[in-house]
Amino acid sequence: MNASPEFRSEIAPQPEPSPAVAKFLARKPRLLIGGEWVESSSKTRIPVFDPATGKQIAEVPDANAEDVNRAVAAARKAFESGPWPDMLPAQREALLWRLADLIDRHAEELAELESLDNGKTKLMASMVDIPAASAQFRYMAGWATKIEGSTFQTSLPGPPGAKYHTYTVREPVGVVGQIVPWNFPLIMAATKLAPALAAGCTCVLKPAEQTPLSALRLGELIIEAGFPPGVVNILTGYGETTGAAIVAHPDVDKIAFTGSTEVGKIINKSASDTVKRVSLELGGKSPVIVLPDADLETVVGGAAQAIFFNSGQVCVAGSRLFAHRKVFDKVLEGVAGVAKSMKLGPGLHPETQMGPLVSREQQERVLGYIKSGREEGAAVVVGGDAPQHPGYFVRPTVLADVRRDMRVFREEIFGPVLVAQRFDDLDEVAAAANDTPYGLAASIWSNDLRAVHRLVPKIKAGTVWVNCHHMIDANMPFGGYKQSGFGRENGRTAIEMYTELKSVCIAI
Ligand code: NAI
Ligand code: MG
């Protein structure tokens, strides 16, 4: 994959980072524990790479079990005593708003940091990642003042005339461990922290080892916003060590995780030892279903976006295309045309349309899937390889002649690789779409109201989009069926995940 000296790459060079980002990197990020930036007691550090060049741009502490103990103790202390538990809901709301404003004020810097760390384009980060993160904090800020229980009647026995006053109250679940992946680092951190803080919990957040930078910058903004020490603690480290120690810690009340189904299963097992509350947002293999009446121009753009957005590194990526036999060839040709025309490049370059994958490991994994597809008999319609360049690029790829027993159909590839199949009727496509252990999302493309309403109930997925894909809103519950996880982030349901329901029964 290394470019020979005489090779002129089609990939543009990565522009220099801005002074604000250079200044942040020069601060040498540490761990945020109890309101202080501290070194890890491990003394070892994790290298952070720019995926567009393969060059190291930073290193962050590798938190060990002792650091986890310190962070959990700080979170516990902040939960039980000090200003946080006494704070009025409206004060928590104000803090969350202040944080959202700070994110917006530093949007340019955060977008650049996200681009450098993850590989996505700065343009996309400024349009999607940063505004979605501040929107999440603002939306959840509103919930801080709206958490409620209910009063209800009972039929409890007692002496004649006995009366009971019974009601429920929602209380914060306690110290929460939040483990997030690298595909949308800041959005993931925001989606975990915002509802927890609105509910009054305290947090130990672990960003992914590949992309720790925006969470650490967020930590600085959290301090600047005025959150009391220990309310948010941020530990950088590897999953198998730092992450596992958070999950196993007896003083953590809840784990919220987004990542692979494989690790979700490990976490669920480990958390069961202490009967922690667990919410899991895991992998997917989401179908894009095109009915014969659909507007093909909309479909082509939508289906291409569904798989190529964020270089396909999206849990809800529309990675399986099912197009009706009548329109299959046209849709395939259209999506392949989009793939062919996409300009690969480094995230900070203004002309780049698709950035690299996050890591060498992911690049190899995705290329491995393409290879397995070829070996099992799939046809590569477009793409299928990596440009000669030290960055972790993979060309947008479309595979046809795909069978349902192939690995590329069954497994989450998590890259810009689409597998395409034709179908003849609704029952057939519903069965094919559901022929997966996953159930995160699906999109249906049609204006045939009856067909759409017949299909929606047949699809086993937590989100079904019609004539759109990737639409995720802070007020719209989000989560998976089947092995895509359980629990629903966003909306009221997120607040429910970060609270316990207490029933109170008073004999009066
Ligand atoms: P991963 O699931 O290993 O990593 C996600 C997060 O979990 C990271 O913060 C990691 O440090 C942590 N982690 C890993 N092992 C852990 C453990 N034993 N205990 C506690 N925390 C742990 O995902 P990875 O290895 O980065 O990517 C592998 C595949 O996972 C991808 O190819 C993709 O298919 C899937 N994935 C799905 C995501 C989603 O949004 N649903 C996000 C990232 C990856
Ligand atoms: Mg892993």
Image (spheres, helix red, strand yellow):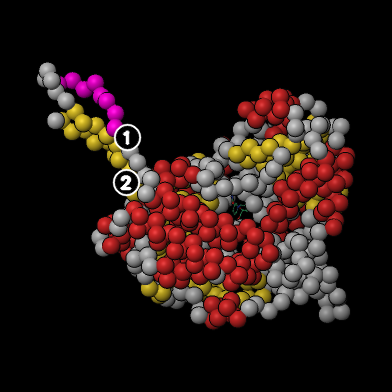
Q: Nearer the viewer, residue 190 or 364?
A: 190
Q: For the point 25% across and 60% down, which residue is it?
A: 81
- Residue 362: give its label: none
* Residue topped by disc 2: 171
- The range drawn in magenta is 150-158
Residue 143 horizontal side relative to residue 186, left or right: left
Earlier residue among tags 2 and 1: 1
Main SS class of the magenta portion in the image: loop
- Residue 150: give its label: 1
How many residues crowd around disc 1 within 10 Å: few (fewer than 14), some, or many (20 or more)?
few
Q: For the point 63% across and 46% down, which residue is it?
A: 471
Quarter location, residue 234 = bottom left
Question: Ligand 1 is found in which quarter of the picture?
Answer: bottom right
Q: What is the spatial separation of the Cα atoms under label 2 and label 1, in whole angstroms?
A: 13 Å
Residue 326 horizontal side relative to residue 219, left or right: right
Q: For the point 86% across and 75% down, which residue is it?
A: 8
